[in-house]
Image (spheres, grey):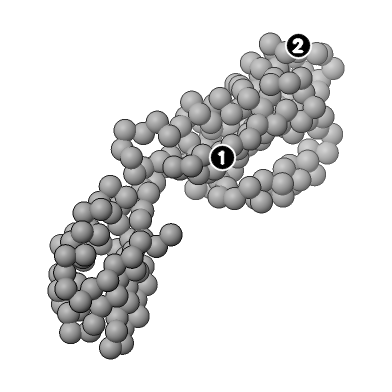
Amino acid sequence: MNNNNLDTYKTIVSPGEETLLKEKKSKFYGYAFPISTVDEVKPILEKLKKKHHTACHVCYAWQIGVETIRYRANDDGEPNNSAGMPIYGQIQSCDVTNILVAIVRIFGGTKLGVGGLISAYRESAQLALKASAIVERTIKQEFVLSFDYPIMDKVMRVIKQHQIEIVAQQLEMNCSYIISVRKQKATEIESIFTSMQYITIKRKE
């Protein structure tokens, strides 16, 4: 990602509005969907194919991940690199991740040529992304805190002072908290708790 802040990224939280680009009687319907796994891609594409059963091509690109990026671009029968990569280029241009952008083409009888296709798919992807609400998210690091009940007050003082989010808690004689902190502050928080007696802190993978 191209962020200056190491612990933020951009994505969309809900599907964008359908967009339509017309080029020499061909119609290009654009869509953007939030995804977190590759398994979500196929069912979305199948729904689009059912919705546009006269479509010749459903071309797409997706990107998943924040620190480790995975992506794929697919031309779905259009000439090599004339559809998938122009779509992926727009995902990169908007600096978004955990997203699928799909363009459905309904042929209008006039061939556009490779240059025309590249331009149409790029513009259609741009429209689909513009019709989506892009939000900034913070990368979090979770920790497991284990400590004895008598030092609960000390632990809570640190949690309040640093505005740490408690994700889950188990309160018995031995207490256990799952806490979530911004990635930028993770090392600082870890060292604070490590320096305290009778507390163990582990990073949650």
Query: Based on the displayed image, in which of its 4 quarters is residue 169 positioned?
Result: bottom left
Say whether residue 68 is left or right of residue 41.
left
User: For the residues marked 2 and 1, what is the alpha-carbon distance in whole angstroms?
Assistant: 30 Å
| Residue identifier under label 1 | 70
In the image, residue 100 sits, relative to residue 159, either above or below, namely above
Say whether residue 66 is left or right of residue 38.
left
Note whether residue 133 is visible.
no
Which labelled disc corresponds to residue 113? Answer: 2
Amino acid, disc 2: Gly
- The image quadrant where one finds the C terminus is bottom left
In the image, residue 131 sits, relative to residue 153, either above or below, namely above
In the image, residue 106 sits, relative to residue 15, either above or below, namely above
Task: Mark 1: give few (<14), some (14-19) or many (20+) Cα within 10 Å.
Answer: few
Q: Residue at x 29, y 75 (%)?
A: 146
Which labelled disc corresponds to residue 78? Answer: none
- Horizontal and vertical percent position of residue 101: 61, 36
- Horizontal and vertical percent position of residue 57: 78, 30
Q: Residue at x 70, y 31 (%)?
A: 74
